[in-house]
Image (spheres, rainbow, N blue to C red):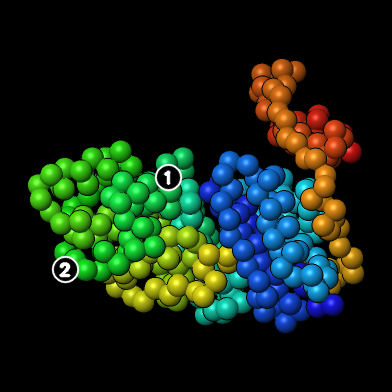
Amino acid sequence: MLKAYLGIDVGSISTKGVLIDENREVIRSSYLRTLGRPIEAIKKLVAELFNENKNIEIKGVGTTGSARRLAGVIVGADVIKNEIITHAVAASHFYPEARTIIEIGGQDSKIILLKDGVPIDFAMNTVCAAGTGSFLEHQATRLGIPIEEFGTYALKATSGATIAGRCTVFAESDMIHKAQLGISVEEIIRGLCDAIVRNYLSTVAKGKPIEPLVLFQGGVAANIGVKAAFERALRMQVIVPRYFLVMGAIGAAFLAQDYVQKNLSTKFVGPALLDINFQTKTFECHDCANFCEVVETYKNSQIIDRYGDRCGKWSEINP
C-alpha cells in the first residue's frame, strides 16, 4: 500500500482535495462545487479519492478553508488550519523565494506577505465579493462566454474600457453601458480585468509592499486576463503555480504529515464516514446580551462539536 496524506479545503464555492505521498509529491487532486452543502461535498470528495486510489493508505488528514472546522470533525482531521497558513506552507514549499501571495477564490480575496517562508502579514477582503471568482463567472455567463475562455478575450484587446471595480452592481452597469456604446466585448473584458486588479490593490492589498517573487493562487488565477492585468499594474512577473487551484489543500496535507510524523497516529475516520449521518444545527443563546449563535455538529444524532459562544458556556461542554 502506498502511504499518503489527505488535504481538504472547503470553501463557499468549491471543495478541493489532494493526496500527497511521503515525498510530498501530489498523487491526485480533486475539485468540485460545494453547492451550499458542505457535508455532502466533503463526503463526495472523500468517496472520489478512495474509489480512485484503492491501493493507498491514508496516514493523516488536514483541513482548511471557511468550513475547515466542520470538515475537520467529519473526517477526523489531525490538523485544522486557516487558509493563510496553508497557502503559505504550500507556496514556500514550491517557491522558497516567494515574498507575496495573491489569492483570489470564489468569494474571497487575500494577500499574504512572506519572509523566509513564514507569513509576516496578511489581509482579506471584507463582505463584498467584487472581483472574486463568482463575480467573474456571473459576467462570463451573462456575456455567453465560457469562463475558461474569458481571459483569452481580454488578451485580444489592445486597450481596456473603463469599468468600476469596487462594486459588482456598478461594474455590471458599466459593462452594460459600454456595450451599448458599441465598445467591443474584448475591450470590456480587459477593462473588467483591470478593474478587478485595481479593486484588489486598493481594498485588499491597501498599500502593503508587494515584492517579487509574486505568486497568484486560487481559482481566478486560471484567468490569464487577470494575471496579465496584475503584471501591468505591478510591473513585475506574476507566477501561477502548477497547483494554483489546490494550494490550500496541499498546505493542509503537508501540515498533517508533519503532525503525524511527530505524534505517530492519526484520527482519520476512514471510508466509514461515508455511511455516517452528519448534521449541523444552530441556536441563539439568550443567557446574556451577546446573543451568541451557537453551532452544533451531530454524528448520528450525537453532538460531536459545539462552538460560537463567547463565554465558553456551551463549547466547554463539548463531548
Query: With respect to residue 225, does 1 lie above or below?
Result: below
Seen at 58% across and 66% down, the residue is 247
Q: Is residue 282 left or right of residue 138?
A: right
Of marks 1 and 2, the one in the foreground: 2
The residue type indicated by label 2 comes to: Thr
Q: Is residue 137 visible?
A: yes
200 in relation to 242, above or below: above
- Relative to 141, say whether 291 is above or below: above
Can the viewer see residue 113 in this picture?
no
Residue bearing mark 2: 158
The 10 Å Cα crowd at callout 2, few under 14, some 14 to 19, many 20 or more, is few
In the picture, measured across the screen, residue 131 lies left or right of residue 90, that is: left
The percent position of residue 22, horizontal first and vertical second, equals: 76, 79
Residue shown at 49% from the left, 61% from the top: 218
What x and y, as percent, mark residue 299?
83, 39
Separation of disc 1 and disc 2 at Cα?
28 Å
* Identity of the residue furthest to the bottom in this view: 23
**Residue 216 spot, x, y in % from top left:** 45, 67
Relative to the observer, which residue lies in front, 268 or 27?
27
